[in-house]
Image (tube, helix red, strand yellow):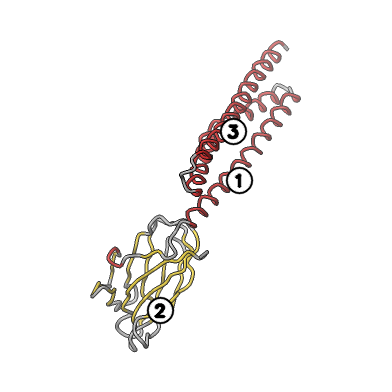
């Protein structure tokens, strides 16, 4: 009996310590976010979107920094719950379970908050993009294609390709706009591929000189990853003479 009492007292102290630390973490987080909000509001010289991005990044870093110690407390509570149940202190075990579930609910809320912050950050980044994002032809890695007279030509086989590294775009949908020239015996089918998704478009004859064509909207998941244009089928010897590639955020 004496052992059970002493164990219960030690568990209570440990639980109060864990919960106190948890409370301190969240109090500090709330105060820090409020203080940062006050400082950012005073910086009138900065554009609104820069203030919002700073606030989002600050809140996210604070939440992320607090996750590991909170998870540690959660494991401690689970251990205490098990110990009390084994000692037949069922009232104490139920109390530990209630505290554990409370913290689990808080972690779920924080996970949702991080997702909302990420979505908001991506939305702000997307709003700052130019209307048209060029992919410079001279920065493409070519395979079975050559640069000639400022255009990419010689797409003479299926699989011939030009590949770019995307310029740190926020994930989302982007329309793919090509400007090209295509003779009567040229043309075929082109594929545009990012890290996960792709789309295909037909390269048609341009009767009155170079023309622009919107090949559709491509979902980009990795804004710093590769984007590849590759020939799928050819009418004869050359898919096209490509003059420019632009991406347009689908929200524009």
Disc number lying in front (3 or 1): 3
Q: Mark 2 points at which residue?
A: 189
For this rendering, which residue is in front, 191 or 244?
A: 244
Judge the density around disc 1: few (<14), some (14-19), many (≥20) Cα neighbours within 10 Å. Answer: few
Mark linked to residue 112? 1
Which is nearer the eye, 206 or 197?
206
Please tell me which residue lies in front, 51 or 210: 51
Per the image, the residue denoted by label 3 is 30
Label 3 – label 1 distance at C-alpha: 17 Å
The answer to which of marks 3 and 2 sits earlier in the sequence is: 3
Tell me which label, 3 or 1, sits earlier in the chain. 3
Location of residue 201 with respect to 131 vertically, above or below? below
Badge 3 crowding class, 10 Å Cα cut-off, few under 14, some 14 to 19, many 20 or more, is some
The N terminus, quarter of image: top right
Numbered badge on residue 198: none
User: Quarter-wise, where is residue 8 in the image?
Assistant: top right
Q: Which residue lies furthest to the right in this view?
A: 91
Indicate the secondary structure of the residue bearing disc 3: helix
Q: How far apart are marks 1 and 2 (CA)?
A: 42 Å
Q: Whole-percent x and y of residue 21?
A: 59, 25
Q: Residue at left 49%, top 43%?
A: 44
């Amino acid at each position: 009996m004496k052992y059970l009492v002493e164990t219960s007292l030690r568990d209570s102290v440990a639980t109060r310590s864990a919960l106190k630390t948890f409370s301190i973490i969240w109090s500090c987080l709330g105060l820090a976010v409020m203080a940062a909000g006050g400082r950012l509001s005073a910086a009138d010289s900065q554009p609104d979107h820069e203030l919002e991005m700073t606030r989002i990044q600050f809140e996210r870093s604070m939440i992320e920094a607090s996750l590991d110690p909170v998870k540690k407390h959660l494991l401690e509570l689970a251990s205490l719950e098990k110990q009390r149940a084994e000692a037949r202190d069922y009232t104490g075990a139920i109390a530990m379970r209630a505290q554990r579930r409370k913290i689990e609910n808080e972690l779920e809320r924080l996970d949702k908050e991080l997702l909302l912050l990420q979505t908001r950050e991506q939305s702000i980044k997307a709003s700052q993009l130019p209307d048209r994002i060029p992919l410079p032809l001279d920065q493409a890695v070519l395979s079975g294609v050559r640069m000639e007279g400022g255009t990419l030509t010689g797409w003479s086989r299926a699989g011939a390709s030009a590949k770019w590294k995307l310029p740190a775009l926020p994930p989302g949908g982007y329309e793919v706009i090509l400007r090209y020239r295509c003779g009567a015996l040229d043309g075929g089918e082109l594929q545009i591929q990012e890290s996960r998704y792709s789309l295909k478009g037909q390269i048609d004859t341009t009767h009155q000189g170079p023309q622009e064509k919107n090949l559709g909207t491509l979902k980009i998941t990795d804004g710093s990853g590769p984007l590849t244009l590759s020939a799928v089928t050819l009418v004869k010897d050359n898919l096209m003479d490509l003059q420019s590639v632009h991406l347009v955020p689908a929200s524009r």
